[in-house]
Amino acid sequence: MFSESFIAPSPEEAYKLAIQKYGSIDNFKIIKATQYKNRDKELVSEITIEVNEDAYLESCGISEEEALIEEMNLLKSKMDKMREALSPNSVTENKESKDEIEIVKDLLINRGLSRNWVENMLNPFIGTQVAQDKKLLLSFVLEEIEEAIEISKKTIDSRINIFVGTTGVGKTTTVAKLTGWSALKGVNPDDIALINLDNYRVGAQEQLGFYAKSMGVDYYCPSTPDELKDVINSLTFKKLIFIDTAGSSPYDREKLLDTVKYCKSIDSTLKTLSATLVVSVTSKYEDLKDIYEHFSFLNIDNVIATKFDETKKVGNLIAFLLDTNLPVSFLSVGQEVPIDLEIATKRRILEAFIGEIDEK
């Protein structure tokens, strides 16, 4: 979040300046309002607002991607030096360069990146002048990550959206957040329906039902695939349908088969069905891969990463995204519904990862 102040002869005029820049009170939050005398001893009013990063960059005429590209320009310039250093004349086999490469490898692998990916990136530099420059090696890796990570270009594009994932990742809360997020973006709650397929977890239906009631959206709990099909067919007038499924371990065959049966019951709508895999940033890379493989029958469209606020280690998530090429759409950054949900950006993910490296 960014803070910005507006000064004018009166509070009303200062407020108008903020509205003029950001368009609507919905785009910022007033956190302070004061009056004081300036150097000319004139009474003036000052309001201080808090605005999210996207709105601030847009007000400056800079898109988020442009801002990120600007930040990465320095890294790109360093790449030219690396290419020069990779020329045949620059190769100098020595133990020092190999040791430095191994240090950087260990650092990245310990931060969650897969060994194969790291070695493929860095092994070509062994014996070159670049291998003796730790910062340059890290710059190269960061640029490769920035180029490889996919961000979903469309946050919610389908009318019917199903969410799958393991128990405990915050899937139900995420569905509730997306419902609230959609309402804040202008979708009438009367045009949204929530469907809960979790007939296993105690309290699961009550939890999502509470959120549905508080947000004024219709809520359904079909107990069989046929009932789900009937519910879907009865909701042709709804603009958005969010389907929450039972969380399960990749090795829980019973729950996985149930999910398959439910999805097959709406085969006729599969062309408009978007499947989202909800994963926790705190999960191990190997577990993330297992989860994805067991839900891959759904043709996963995108990933939502939860618990982004609960760890400083995002390397496992990055490794997973690099390996699967799945686009990430949202980041869940807390428990509060619906505000603790952010549209995913490369900047946010890279900043978290760079923070990990800086701590080392």
Image (cartoon, rainbow, N blue to C red):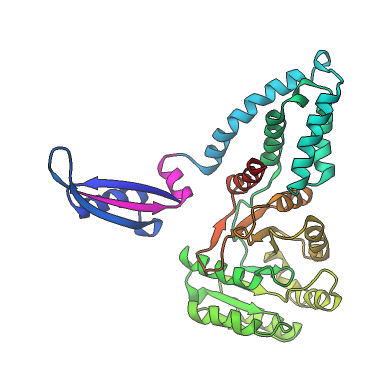
Does the magenta segment cover residue 201? Answer: no
Residue 78, quarter of picture: top right
The foreground one among 263 and 120 is 120
Q: Position of residue 161 (x, y in %)?
A: 65, 68
**Is any part of residue 79 visible from this angle?**
yes
Q: Residue at x 82, y 13 (%)?
A: 89
Q: Residue at x 69, y 62 (%)?
A: 280
Left or right for 18, reference 109? left
Left or right for 211, reference 261? left
**Is any part of residue 237 visible from this angle?**
no
Q: Position of residue 67 (x, y in %)?
A: 52, 38
**The C terminus - image quarter:** top right
Please determine whether, in this image, residue 241 is positioned above or below residue 141.
below
Magenta range? 45-61
Please determine whether, in this image, residue 356 is positioned above or below residue 122.
below
The foreground one among 131 and 29 is 131
Q: Position of residue 259 (x, y in %)?
A: 78, 75
Residue 334, quarter of picture: bottom right
Residue with the most extreme top position: 89
